[in-house]
Amino acid sequence: MAVEGGMKCVKYLLFFFNLIFWICGIALIGLGIYVQIYLNATLTINNASASGPPIVLIVVGVVIFFISFFGCCGAAKENYCMVTTFAILLGIIFLVEIAAAIAGYVFRNKVQDVFRDSINDSVSNYNVTKEAKDGMDAIQQTFHCCGANSSSDWNNYPPFKGSGTVPDTCCKVIVTGCGKNSTNIYTNGCIQGIDDWMKKYVGIIAGVALGIAFFEILGIVFACCLMKGIRSGYEVM
């Protein structure tokens, strides 16, 4: 009876953890979509590696969403095959997350270079394509910055070259023609602004990732315990 009670407890815990996984999967999908839309709305991406992080988030979220299905059903029906599938898939996704974290750390400078090149291209092509203009305007408004490295960058490109003016989206208070007033503009560059924004939120993302990894390990442990109980022929109600 004590064994049956313990296995029943493991069963309910596994079911509970899978509900958490399911919610985490939805959250990762939503976060990945938000980041991807945000990047597409603000940056003219010329390198696919810049879209890598949000795509990874979406893929991992979808995988976790479906893995939780096997875990929930396997725990509810005491199905050895489904619980085993859940444990194996969860172990694989855990290893993939570790590999992605290592790759992200190793190639972090390359991703920063991609953003830097993208912003420089947007500044130089501001008066050439509508895509570059809209993207740079969105960046400057969002991150409260001006130019790539500083507001003086605009003095090198038309239609602002040699005029001492900047786009109106550089202004602290945006009104038509405000870019002609140098006292009303942001002077810090957008490259540094985006870099500061990324550093601000990387800790939060890392914390969430560690939390998910912790629950994944617990899920694997509980799944293995339930598998052992089912395989041993215990009656789990």
Image (spheres, rainbow, N blue to C red):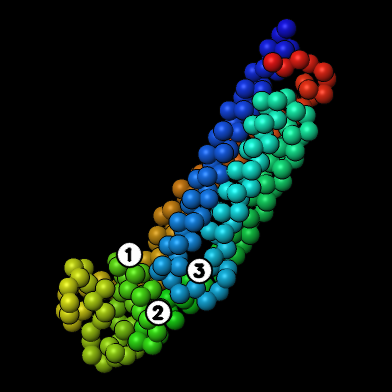
| Mark earlier in primary sequence (2, 1) | 2
Q: Position of residue 44 (x, y in %)?
A: 45, 74
**Between marks 2 and 1, how big is the CA–CA gap?**
15 Å
The C terminus: image quadrant:
top right
Q: Residue at x 61, y 62 (%)?
A: 106
Q: Which residue is mark 1?
A: 142
Query: Is 68 placed above or below 107 here?
Result: above
**Amino acid at the residue labelled 3:** Gln
Is residue 160 shown left or right of residue 22? Answer: left
User: Dot 1 surroundings within 10 Å: few (below 14), some, or many (20 or more)?
Assistant: some
The mark lying in front, picked from 3 and 2, is: 2
Is residue 32 shown left or right of residue 92? Answer: left
The mark lying in front, picked from 2 and 1, is: 2
**Amino acid at the residue labelled 2:** Ala
Query: Is 31 placed above or below 236 here?
Result: below
Q: Which mark is residue 132?
A: 2
Q: Position of residue 154 (x, y in %)?
A: 31, 84
Q: Dot 2 lies on which element?
A: helix
Q: Dot 1 lies on which element?
A: helix
Q: Position of residue 26 (x, y in %)?
A: 52, 45
Q: Dot 3 lies on which element?
A: helix
The answer to whether the residues at label 3 and label 2 have Cβ atoms under 8 Å apart is no
